[in-house]
Image (tube, rainbow, N blue to C red):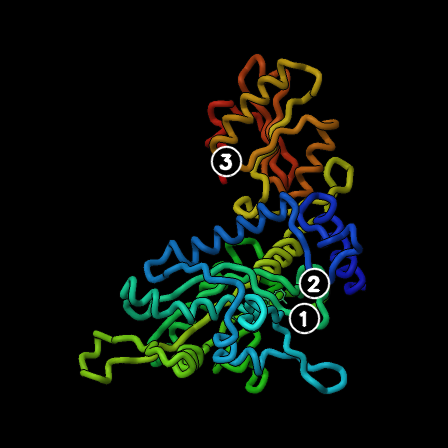
């Protein structure tokens, strides 16, 4: 019974996302394209909010992080050294293995060379390790962060935006002394839990899984998967891995370039060149979005009518405030509403003006996209300079003075 209900929930989320402009099937007019999805205005806004919050928590709020933005198309040498050319494969039904990287060729004719769309953002970090060290001379431990697309030719893409062929990752490679790996692993584990709480993923539906020997990626000595109870079952949301010195060491050997780090703190002559070890928190953006949507989707009865709303944190909601004139055909109401809309827009950016359809429909539309506040301008506004502010979660309305409105709407 529960399973059926949950299956149903997935259909409802997919349908809401399409109807309300969050997520569209890619190339839909040509029948769609498995594993590829496009983002409409609200999905794009939500993704941008996720990325901004991640960058703030994982990069700019810290003092030990450096951002990079590397190429998506990756030279074959890089992925040979990292083990992806030989090892990044899935078994096929007949027992053979299928490399899930998208292969392409760069350049024309005899000069062309094989390359790949990157399967993770991580390698663009490792290949820039020396550049960042040479430019910034960071002290260990420090991290390099990147947000960007990754591509995997998944044999069986499925479950909406859960298993994709084109995805986006938010990754940190955190460079440490080997002896500090356990403490550092724990620090990132805590950070991921803090993140989960901050963006509104249901903590009770999130679980840690210690990935067993033999099941970890080829580079990892310890991995925890953060799993989430998606409507289609408990599945991986994020990964936290101890990658040892695997990547830097292999890139050093394959490229012939010294990638060691000069450790000034040890003062022991030649021995103070070390290859740092790495802890890697790796977070997929689309799985984040799906876990947030699954956590936020709510049905209740309001004013005797069933309704659907997304209980999104205001930091994640694509629209923060909607402003309505009570009636569309009263120019004085519309003018006042426009005035208030512009005040709020200056402050909160993601503000919409809506005079389409009756007021009840407008509220429901905003509920469905998770807008935390709706401000309505009515006839009283014209005489007493107050507006109604409606709270998404309980539907309650309060009269607020216009001059206090900006302060009242806490986002
Ligand atoms: N750099 C490490 C790495 O890429 P991974 O476990 O293969 O590790 C990390 O991927 C995260 O990227 C996953 O936990 C998930 O959030 C996301 N991810 C991976 N493959 C995905 C896919 N096919 N579709 C959507 N998200 C995916």
Could you give the CA–CA distance between mark 2 and mark 1, rounded to whole angstroms?
Answer: 8 Å
Q: Earlier in the sequence, mark 2 or mark 3?
A: 2
Where does residue 242 sit, x and y in percent of width and height? 45, 77
Q: Is disc 3 surrounded by few (<14), some (14 to 19) or many (20+) residues within 10 Å? A: some
Nearer the observer, 161 or 300: 161
Q: Residue at x 55, y 70 (%)?
A: 112
Nearest to viewer (mark 3 / mark 1): 1
Visible residue check, residue 267: yes
Whether disc 1's CB lies below 8 Å from ligand 1 is answered yes
Query: What residue is drawn where x is 57% and y is 70%?
Result: 116
From the image, tell me which residue sits under label 2: 35
For the residue carrying disc 2, how many other residues have a C-alpha within 10 Å: few (<14), some (14-19), or many (20+)?
many
Q: Are marks 2 and 1 in contact (CB under 8 Å)?
A: yes
Residue hosting label 1: 154
Residue designated by label 3:
348
* Quarter of the displayed picture in which ligand 1 can be seen: bottom right
**Label 2 – label 3 distance at C-alpha:** 34 Å
Position above or below: 12 against 340:
below
Q: Earlier in the sequence, mark 3 or mark 1?
A: 1
Residue 364 is drawn in which quadrant?
A: top right
């Amino acid at each position: 019974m529960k399973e059926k209900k949950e299956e149903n929930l997935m259909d409802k989320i997919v349908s809401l996302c399409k109807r309300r402009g969050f997520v569209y099937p890619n190339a839909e007019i040509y029948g769609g394209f498995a594993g590829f999805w496009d983002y409409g205005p609200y999905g794009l806004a939500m993704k941008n909010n996720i990325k901004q919050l991640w960058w703030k928590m994982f990069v700019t709020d810290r003092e030990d992080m450096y951002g990079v933005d590397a190429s998506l198309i990756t030279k074959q040498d890089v992925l040979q050294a990292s083990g992806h050319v030989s090892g990044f494969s899935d078994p096929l039904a007949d027992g053979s293995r299928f490399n899930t990287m998208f292969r392409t060729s760069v350049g024309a004719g005899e000069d062309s060379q094989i390359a790949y769309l990157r399967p993770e953002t991580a390698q663009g970090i490792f290949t820039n390790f020396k550049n960042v060290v040479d430019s910034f001379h960071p002290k260990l431990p420090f991290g390099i962060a990147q947000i960007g697309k990754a591509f995997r030719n998944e044999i069986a893409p499925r479950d909406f935006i859960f298993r994709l062929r084109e995805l986006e990752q938010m990754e940190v490679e955190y460079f440490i002394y080997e002896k500090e790996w356990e403490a550092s692993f724990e620090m990132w584990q805590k950070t991921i839990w803090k993140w989960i709480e901050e963006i509104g993923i249901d903590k009770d539906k999130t679980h840690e899984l210690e990935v067993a020997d033999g099941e970890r990626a080829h580079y990892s000595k310890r991995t925890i998967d953060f799993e989430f109870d998606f409507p289609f079952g408990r599945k991986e949301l994020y990964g936290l891995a101890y990658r040892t010195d695997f990547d830097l060491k292999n890139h050093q050997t394959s490229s012939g370039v010294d990638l060691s780090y000069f450790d000034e703190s040890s003062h022991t002559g030649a021995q103070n060149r070390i290859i740092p070890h790495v802890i890697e928190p790796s977070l997929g953006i689309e799985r984040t979005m799906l876990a947030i949507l699954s956590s936020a989707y709510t049905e209740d009865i309001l004013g005797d009518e069933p309704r659907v709303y997304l209980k999104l944190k205001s930091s994640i909601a694509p629209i923060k405030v909607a402003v309505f004139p009570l009636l569309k055909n009263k120019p004085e109401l519309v003018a006042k509403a426009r005035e208030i809309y512009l005040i709020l827009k200056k402050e909160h950016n993601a503000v919409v003006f809506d005079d389409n359809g009756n007021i009840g429909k407008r509220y429901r539309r905003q509920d469905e996209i998770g807008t935390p506040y709706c401000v309505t301008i009515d006839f009283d506004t014209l005489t007493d300079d107050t507006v109604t502010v409606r709270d998404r979660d309980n539907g309650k309305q309060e009269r607020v003075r216009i001059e206090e409105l900006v302060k009242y709407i806490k986002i």
